[in-house]
Image (cartoon, grey):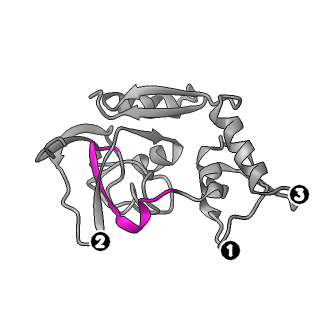
Amino acid sequence: MSQIPKTQKAAVIESHEKPVEIQTIPVPTPGPDDVLVKIEYTGICHTDLHAAEGDWPIPIVLTLVGSREGSELSGYSVDGSFQEYCVARGSHVAQMKPFQQAVDYTHRWGTVACITLPAGAKDTFPVSDLVLQQLTTRGSIVGNHQDLAEALDFAARGKVNYHYRVMGMDQTAQIYEDMQAGKIAGRISLDMHNH
């Protein structure tokens, strides 16, 4: 097991008027119900750009580590995942339900098909994810757990094309500029080791 460092690199938003900066900051200390998560890769999307520019009606707390990945309000009121280590609620760090995974991995304007209900399914719905990504959902009573397993296997075998690029955390400011200029097709994943 490796030693947890005292400091880490992070993409920090200090002001809406200047680019995000890579800074050395302390590794956060988890509280009693939290866990410390080592970030290997994290997604960057237009929501992150809006937070950095401050052009949404949702106010963000500055100075802040960017990204909305990881928790509902991360990147707005608590530090996000654009850092080598982040704190998350222990109850949030678990295997996701298949529907949420489907939402998380569906490209903007895509369609999520619900073909089964897992045992103990609750009536929760990731409304903000669906709205922000402009997703369509389709439900079908034709299907079962085996159909779901086959659909997930289909994706795991590479039969679903997913357009992405991996870039270094040190390129975050350039990625935001490229987003603003409409130069990015697909998804960008930040390699947290490349800074």
The residue shown at (73%, 43%) is 151
Q: Nearer the viewer, residue 110 or 39?
A: 39
- Percent x, y of residue 103: 64, 51
Q: Is residue 72 left or right of residue 169?
A: right
Instruction: Tell me the distance, in whole angstroms, between the alpha carbons under discs 2 and 3.
Output: 40 Å
The residue carrying mark 1 is 123
Region rendered in magenta: 82-95
Residue type, numbered disc 1: Asp
- Judge the density around disc 2: few (<14), some (14-19), many (≥20) Cα neighbours within 10 Å: few
Q: Which residue occupies the foreground of this view, 148 or 56?
A: 148
Q: Which residue is mark 3?
A: 142
Residue at figure coordinates x 20%, y 39% from the top left: 23
> Residue 33: which numbered mark, if any?
2
Q: Is residue 163 visible?
A: yes
Q: Circle 1 — which element?
A: loop
Classify 76 as above or below 102.
below
Residues packed near mark 1 inside 10 Å, few (<14), some (14 to 19) or many (20 plus): few
The mark nearer the N terminus, 1 or 2, is: 2
Amino acid on which disc 2 is placed = Asp
Find the distance from the CA under tag 1 to the CA under tag 2: 25 Å
Q: Amino acid at mark 3?
A: Val
Image location (x, y in percent) of residue 14:
27, 49
Q: Position of residue 32 (x, y in %)?
A: 24, 72
Mark toward the start of the polypeptide (3 vs 1): 1
